Image (spheres, rainbow, N blue to C red):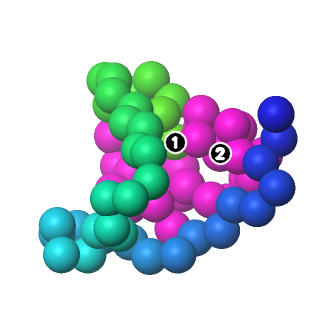
């Protein structure tokens, strides 16, 4: 199933930046160089939703 709309809304680094907890959430966990950022970009059919660094472990925020 392909997502119809996937847009960046806001980066959050503190709990008060997070959106309300009224929708389901999904977490990705893994070692620093397993491709979590690339997986998110691929799943959303976007190349630029998550910034991917050439250095492993450098992704900090979704943007």
Residue 59 location (% of width, % of height): 39, 51
Q: Which residues are magenta?
A: 38-63
Residue 45 location (% of width, % of height): 78, 46
Helix, strand or loop for disc 2: helix
Q: Is residue 47 magenta?
A: yes
Task: Say left or right for 21 vs 44.
Answer: left
User: How would you classify the magenta stretch by its main secondary structure?
Assistant: loop
Please name the residue shown 33% across and 40% down the image.
Answer: 57
Q: CA distance from mark 1 to mark 2?
A: 6 Å
Question: Which residue lies most toward the front here?
Answer: 22
Instruction: State which quarter of the image contains the N terminus.
Output: top right
Task: Compare residues 22 and 30 and report the one nearer the observer.
Answer: 22
Please name the residue shown 76% across and 62% down the image.
Answer: 5
Task: Compare residues 26 and 63 and report the one nearer the observer.
Answer: 26
Residue 62: numbered disc: none
Task: Say left or right for 7 vs 16.
Answer: right
Residue behind mark 1 = 37
Residue 17 location (% of width, % of height): 26, 75
Residue behind mark 2 = 41
Task: Say left or right for 1 vs 50.
Answer: right
């Amino acid at each position: 199933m392909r997502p119809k709309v996937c847009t960046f809304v806001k980066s959050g680094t503190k709990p008060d930046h997070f959106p309300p907890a009224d929708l389901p959430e999904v977490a990705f966990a893994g070692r620093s160089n397993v491709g979590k950022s690339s997986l998110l970009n691929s799943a959303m059919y976007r190349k630029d939703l998550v910034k991917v660094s050439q250095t492993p472990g450098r992704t900090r925020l979704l943007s």
